[in-house]
Image: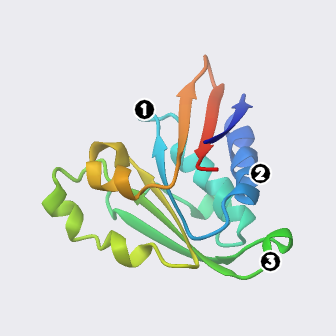
Amino acid sequence: MSVRRFTSDSSSGTIEIGRQIVALLSPPRFLVLRGELGAGKTTLVKGIADALDAADPDEVTSPTFTLIHEYQGKLPAELGERPVVLYHLDLYRIENERQLETLGLEELAAEDAIVLVEWGEKFPSVLRRSGGEIQIEHAGGDARAITLTLPD
């Protein structure tokens, strides 16, 4: 496994780390976003969406009630500048595997997709499908410790 660690001291810093992480996320990619409520998972996605030219940071919101947000973008030039679909899921309100099945996760994991799943650790099927994770932890005040773990 490859592990990269980042430290942020603000929301804008977390967005910037999201922009940097894009260089490591060539599709297809399916990742679990781990962190407590308010840790900054959606804030990190704001930077990822921005770097993919899929959405401005202020357009990215938590999919807590809608469950899935879809953004059309493109990979940066250094990654081939090809179209990419960013899916941001929040499974906090999903209670069991049966409810999870209705989301159609299999269809989301396409060749041109980056799928980021908040609260995916609640479900063994999501963890089995995952190709890595991003862990965000409070590090005092507005500081965050962000760890990206990907298979080699």
Q: Mark 2: which secondary structure?
A: helix
Q: Position of residue 150 (x, y in %)?
A: 60, 48
Q: Is residue 12 left or right of residue 49?
A: right
First reached walking from the N terminus: tag 3 or tag 2? 2
Q: Mark 3: which secondary structure?
A: loop
Residue ID for mark 1: 36
> Does residue 64 show up?
no
Which residue corresponds to the image point at 31% horizontal and 58% vertical from the top-left? 65
Q: Residue 56 occupies which quadrant of the picture?
A: bottom right
Q: Distance between the residues labelled 3 and 2?
A: 16 Å
Quarter placement of the N terminus:
top right
Give the vertical position of 30 relative to 15 (above or below): below
- Callout 1 crowding tier (Cα within 10 Å): few <14, some 14–19, many ≥20: few
Which residue corresponds to the image point at 80% horizontal and 77% vertical from the top-left? 80
Residue ID for mark 2: 20
In terms of depth relative to the viewer, which is nearer, 41 or 84? 84
Residue type at mark 2: give it. Answer: Gln
> Does residue 150 show up?
yes
Q: In this view, does 12 lie to the left or right of 105?
A: right
Residue type at mark 1: give it. Answer: Glu
First reached walking from the N terminus: tag 3 or tag 1? 1
Q: Mark 1: which secondary structure?
A: loop
- Callout 3 crowding tier (Cα within 10 Å): few <14, some 14–19, many ≥20: few
Residue type at mark 3: give it. Answer: Gly
Residue ID for mark 3: 80
Give the vertical position of 131 relative to 106 (above or below): above
- Quick one: which residue is furthest to the top in this view? 140
Which residue corresponds to the image point at 17% horizontal and 50% vertical from the top-left? 95
Task: Judge depth for marks 3 and 1 and give the one in front.
Answer: 3
